[in-house]
Image (cartoon, helix red, strand yellow):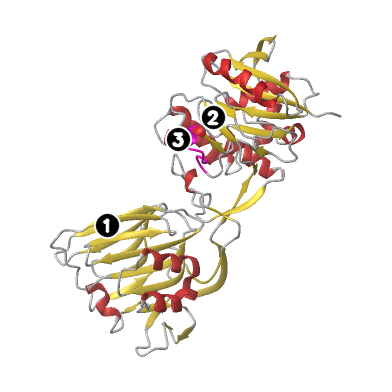
Amino acid sequence: MIDKLAIIVPYRDRQDHLDVFVPHMHQFLKDKGIDYTIFIIEQSDDRPFNYGKLCNAAIKEIPEEYTYFAFHDIDMLPVNDECDYTWPDTPTHLATNVEAHDYKLPYPQYFGGVVLINREDFEDVNGYSNEYWGYGFEDLDLLYRLKNEDVPLEKFYDKNKTYSNYDELDVLPYRIENVELSRNPILHKLKVAKFDKEDYLYGTLNPLGKEIPKKSFTISFWFNDSSEREETKNLFCFEGYDSGLFLNNGNQIIGQIWSEDKKHNQVVVNYSRNVWNHVLFDYDVKTNEISITLNNRYITKQKLSDDFKIFDYTNKHIKISDNKSKIELSEIFLFDSKLEDSAKSELYFHGSKSLNDLKTRFGLEPVIYFDYKKSYSRNLLLDSGLFLNHIRIIGKLNLEEKSINLADEIFIPTRLEGKYKSLVHDNDTDIINRYYTYDPDIIENSDIFFHEVVTNELDYKTIGLSNIKYKLLDKIKREDYELIRVVT
């Protein structure tokens, strides 16, 4: 059987582009030995444009003899041989070098513009979703369907754990451009202390530690918040006027510091529950700033007043967790200086294994390191050095080993280095910014994808080719393309 290609072009009100696109495609494909037809599928109503639904409607209306499809934006014109429209064994993304996108991908999982897929794979995933009206997310949804149906895709790892940092309280739970791809997983072994209600650590600072709050410092640790949302949870604080790190309402981590005249300053970063997060909170005397770094990426800073002096914690206690909440903590370090970004990255990726490297490269050693290896009576021995740091265990100290992956699995289609000239139109070059400007359709689409598709609350097998509803107005066979007009 000879494979036949249907080039399917969702369309509305772009006659000037249509007049350029069709002759260009015929000229480009004329010597390629491909049996193809161009189908223009026109949305003939005033509803928001629905790219996915138009593609599905086209599949319903074209003959079964077409064995594979190219879903094609009308404003993209192929110009090099890597724009290969021959039959694809696996879903293939062609529009990877587009003039309007500065010849780079708008975001790492971009799966739009020009997509090749064979009929079997497309029908197996029930086609595109019909639910995305207006702009965005139908490409991510299709990629998600392909992954769930085990259609062959390339596996990568997202070093920024974008999908794990999902927060159901946000309208846009994460920024898709933050995905950072790696070929290999990044595994990190942790010795974890599980604090139940009534469990916490409490004690005085050792002679070195007592000097910390008087100058620059950095607090670093991993935490996993898997219990119910609470207004405030203590993670690590110097008691008195409590300075340190706290969780608020199950979605904010707060770094706060008090001045000697009892004025409060804080920085806030959103975090995700039910996943491991790495946080660093630092106070820099030289720049007079406090800052939080979360998961080696999200940073927020606060400039303190020129006359700021930290509250005197010399004879105060430190408290880890509290007696009213649950939390998991690991690798708590306290440094008597502000860590540079490169040192913070070392701690994030290598944890306690990086201590020798931190000492050699940066001259850094933690003043306190909670490794949970030794205890006596009701005390936790923090180290075996000169000062024999220890802290009182209140309640229980439940310890276990855990291995976490610092990168999420991410699946990407086969990509060719297709180069495309653009028929530029309004907003065409600014894909990412369009996602984060106020648009009711985009907000609704993001809500469907993030809150229903990614969380598996919506069964994609029931939405797509199987349940599409539309009204066919007519089919018109032109000399160089076929026009299908529908009402969505």
Q: Nearer the viewer, mark 2 or mark 1?
A: 2
Distance of label 2 from label 3 (alpha carbons): 23 Å
Q: Which mark is residue 421?
A: 2
Residue stretch in magenta: 100-107
Can you tell which quarter of the image residue 52 is in? top right
Can you tell which quarter of the image residue 55 is in? top right
Residue occupying the point 80% across, 29% down: 3
Please say if 328 is above or below 384. Answer: above
Give the crowd class for mark 2: few <14, some 14-19, many >=20 residues within 10 Å.
Answer: some
The quarter of the image holding the C terminus is: top right
Q: Label 3 belongs to which residue?
A: 435
Q: Which mark is residue 266?
A: 1
Please say if 101 is above or below 356. Answer: above
Distance of label 2 from label 1 (alpha carbons): 49 Å
Query: Considering depth in this image, is 459 or 13 the residue closer to the camera?
Result: 13
Helix, strand or loop status at disc 3: helix
Residue 97, horizontal then vertical, whole percent: 55, 38
Helix, strand or loop status at disc 1: strand
Badge 2 or badge 3: first in the primary sequence: 2
Helix, strand or loop status at disc 2: strand
Q: Which mark is residue 456?
A: none
Badge 2 or badge 1: first in the primary sequence: 1
Callouts 1 and 3 close, C-beta under 8 Å: no
Q: Amino acid at mark 1?
A: Gln
Can you tell which quarter of the image residue 222 is in? bottom left
